[in-house]
Image: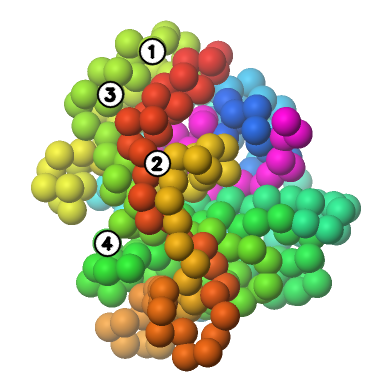
Amino acid sequence: MTARPTIIDCDPGTDDAIALFLALASPELDVRLVSVVGGNVGLDHTLRNARAVVGLTGRAVPVVAGADRPLLGRFVPAAHVHGADGLGGLALPGGPAAAPGIAVDAIRSLLRAAPPRGVTLIGLGPATNLGLALAVEPALAGRVAEIVLMTGAQGEGNVTPAAEFNAYNDPEALAVVLGCGAPVTLATLEVTHQALCRAEEIAALRAAGDGACLRAAAAIWERTPPASRSGGLGMAQHDACAVAWAVAPHLFKSVEVFAEVDCGPGPGRGRTVLAQWARGGRAANARMLTELDSAAFFTLLNARLAALP
Ligand code: RIB
Ligand code: CA
């Protein structure tokens, strides 16, 4: 098996942290860069958190700062979910210094040096960094093997009735990514809520090992409030679903869709329109994940986190 050269763009964020642990523990991925965007909390916190998580794994992966605001307007943070610091108040040792430069340049230079369809992009936050890179240099889409995004919802959003958080925070950037021509896979709220972390899953994780990364992940889970959408049962592991698709696609079922996003100013802003049938003659431009083998997902997650330092 050849590991997939991969860039992870994220806004840690409690679930981003779990997703980063999974990615950095998985031999299927050759993570070349972690780029950071504002979103769940401000860029100052998301950058520090990404550095801390990468540092805890001991992996020598550069972490680079990106956008602290969307293409238009401001990010609407989610500190009520992730805590003011973005990790539920969990204090982690500071990780390595951030790499010099900015995300959009680092992403573009990695893609420029890659062969056709050579790099997988995994987007776990507002798509601002990815959208900027692909808008500035559209030809780079040809160097992208697949763009896997945690974004959007078929039905009700989690920020407004219409919109999921990442899509809502930068719909214009998402529109650029959806239209770039590279293969796109979407992990929407409907599939991420099948990866629901409850007390049982936390206990199983703690029983799986005793390394610093595993214990940090368990502590993050213990600090994250259950999602009201789950009836208070647990926390959806949104971002880890996107990484799990890249690592173990057999855990999922999916359908082809024509995906677009509402960039208007009204109540529908950030809504993802994911059409399986009524495509109006337009060919599908994305794969949408629909079903997850949840038990196998958590078994994989526990095994990979147990293998980390
Ligand atoms: O809607 C969930 C998404 O928004 C996740 O990526 C979470 O980290 C937040 O960024
Ligand atoms: Ca995120």
- For badge 3, the amino acid type reads Ile
The foreground one among 81 and 2 is 2
Kind of residue sitting beneath label 1 = Ala
- Which quadrant is home to the N terminus? top right
The residue under label 2 is 15
Write down the residue under mark 3.
202
**Residue under pointer 4:** 158
Q: Tell whether label 1 touches label 2 (CB within 8 Å).
A: no
Spatial separation of the CA atoms under disc 4 and disc 2? 15 Å
Q: Is residue 86 above or below residue 93?
A: below
Q: Which residues, given as a range, are shown in magenta? A: 1-22
Sort mark 3 into few (<14), some (14-19) or many (20+) by Cα contacts within 10 Å. some
User: Mark 1: few, some, or many residues within 10 Å (few <14, many ≥20)?
Assistant: some
- Label 3 and label 1: CA atoms lie apart by 10 Å
- How far apart are the alpha carbons under marks 2 and 1? 19 Å
Residue 48 x %, y %: 53, 39
The residue where tag 1 is placed is 208
Q: Are marks 4 and 1 in contact (CB under 8 Å)?
A: no
Q: Give the residue at x 54% y 67%.
A: 286
Q: CA distance from mark 2 to mark 3?
A: 14 Å
Q: Secondary structure at mark 3?
A: helix
Q: Amino acid at mark 4?
A: Asn
Residue 85 bears which disc, if any?
none
How crowded pointer 4 is (Cα within 10 Å; few <14, some 14-19, many 20+) is rated as some
Asked if disc 1 is less than 8 Å from ligand 1, the answer is no
Query: Is 105 drawn above or below residue 25 in the view shown?
Result: below
Query: Is residue 7 in the magenta section?
Result: yes
